[in-house]
Image (cartoon, helix red, strand yellow):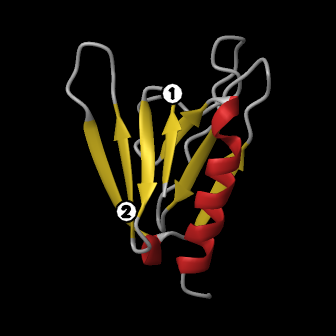
Amino acid sequence: MDVKGVQGSVSFDGEWITITKRAVGHQPREFRLRAADITGTRLKPASRLFHGYLQFLLPGSAPAGESSGIASGGRPPHSDPHSLSIPRRSNDAAAKLMAAVEQARPSR
């Protein structure tokens, strides 16, 4: 299950979430998270004017806040390794991925 984001992608194989981020002029960076370690998820669907985002919350770490301003559109900063901005065309795929991650999380 894959979601194409803005300058990156997220994939989920049923156990591991892999976030790949590409910054201009840099090598792609990959972050892997176990679905069993996730304490929560956040999904803000994109609109016609602004990108949305998906974010994974881990124990002991506060979620990255949304940046304010017209250019960022209320998304976490690109430097946050546990989130990815998504375009409007990826809203459905992002919702399906987040639902799959929620199913894979242990009940607490």
Of labels 1 and 2, the one closer to you: 1
Residue extending furthest left?
27
Amino acid on which disc 1 is placed: Val
User: Which residue is most to the bottom?
Assistant: 107
Q: What element carries label 2?
A: strand
Asked whether, in this view, residue 96 is left or right of residue 30, the answer is: right
Relative to 77, 11 lies left or right: left
Q: Give the residue at x 40% y 74%.
A: 15
Q: Which residue is drawn at 37% across and 62% down?
A: 33
Pick the front one: 61 or 94: 94
Task: Please report the residue visible at 47 percent of the width from the left and 65 percent of the height from the top.
Answer: 60
**Which of the two discs, 1 and 2, labels the residue nearer the N terminus?**
1
Which amino acid, by three-letter code, is at mark 2?
A: Leu
Q: Residue at x 58, y 59 (%)?
A: 97
Please identify the quarter of the rendering in which residue 29 is found.
top left
- Tag 2 residue: 33
Give residue 46's quadrant in the image: top right
Name the residue beneath numbered marker 1: 6
Q: Position of residue 103 (x, y in %)?
A: 61, 78
Q: What count of labels does the image hold?
A: 2
Secondary structure at numbered mark 1: loop
Q: How crowded is mark 2: few (under 14 residues within 10 Å), some or many (20 or more)?
A: some
Q: Is residue 89 above or below residue 42?
A: above
